Amino acid sequence: MTAQEISSGRFVRQANRFTGMITADGSSGFTAEPGRYRLLVSYACPWAHRTLIVRRLLGLEEVIGLGVVDPIRDDRGWRFPEPDPVTGATFLSELYLATDPSYEGRYTVPCVWDTVTGTMVTNDFPMITTMMETEFAAHHRDGAPDLYPEALRPEIDELNELVYTTVNNGVYKAGFATSQDAYEEAFDALFDTFGLLEERLAGRRYLLGDRLTEADVRLYPTLARFDPVYFSHFKCNLRRLSDHPHLWAYARDLYSLPAFGGTTDFDHIKRHYYVTQRNINPSGVVPKGPLLDWTAPHGRDRLGGA
């Protein structure tokens, strides 16, 4: 974070330290093969949530292993409830430091550990899902969706950039702002984009039309956390997700799919944000609400798609 960014009160996300690539042909030094890699996640983390969704959509559960940390994080970072049975680690930091003993940043999820070399391949969350979608294609289940079709990649990438900047990371820029101007800038950009997405989803089932793509995977985790956390905890309180008819129905439509609903843990989500982030919520008290029916009929079948 630069001095200018500190003085402006803007939140700046830490750069990803490990950016290795797993490739189908192994040209990167890491070959896409079953049983070799371990995906390390928190059910609370939106960046990790997208990797859980894709892993399940593509049927990679038996191909890429999974380790889950406790939702409550302290100054030692993410902790495994029990020592991880594959890596032996109690804290995620152990795996970061085993790969780079000089590492000094935050220990973030999601990340991918290579059990063959005993190193961290990547914590570059934007690339992990597309890597699963492309480099692990030979291991996808029969009938798995093509979440990153080549013909649609420019449109997906453009939409992902907008959603990341103003929505996925935008809620953090609002919640962690330390100046009024920085907060209002992020707040306004977030709800401007919500308005655009509301219009976009009025006539199409998914963001790119009648097919599920990477763009939907990236938007959903923020929507799932919006009313329980971001609306109040991050002061993103112009309107709730449930006040946007098309966005709310779209989110419920996605939730009805096992890969989305089955990886959404509201208990982990709420306990992580309200207990861990004491700078925003000093008491650590976790709110009981909101009362939302994620299983209510969404009515979006009429727009087509699977």
Image (tube, helix red, strand yellow):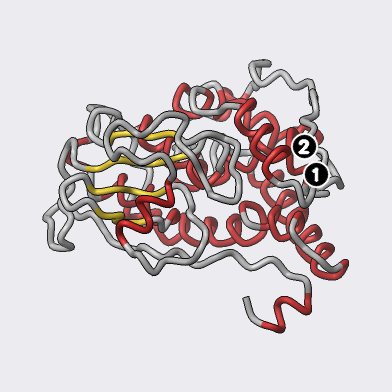
Q: Residue 133: give x, y in percent of width and height.
A: 31, 45
Location of residue 78 with respect to 10 vertically, above or below: above
Secondary structure under tag 1 reads: loop
Query: Label 2 amino acid?
Result: Gly
Query: Label 1 amino acid?
Result: Asn
Taking depth in this image into account, of 53 and 38 the one nearest to the observer is: 38
- Residue at coordinates 35% horizontally, 34% vertically from top-left? 84
- Circle number at residue 281: 1
Taking depth in this image into account, of 263 and 305 the one nearest to the observer is: 263
Q: Residue 209: give x, y in percent of width and height.
A: 51, 41
Taking depth in this image into account, of 111 and 298 the one nearest to the observer is: 111
CA distance separating discs 2 and 1: 6 Å
- Circle number at residue 104: none
Q: Is residue 132 left or right of residue 296?
A: left
* Residue position for label 2: 284
Q: Residue 191: give x, y in percent of width and height.
A: 77, 53
Choose top left, top right, bottom left or bottom right for residue 68. Answer: top left
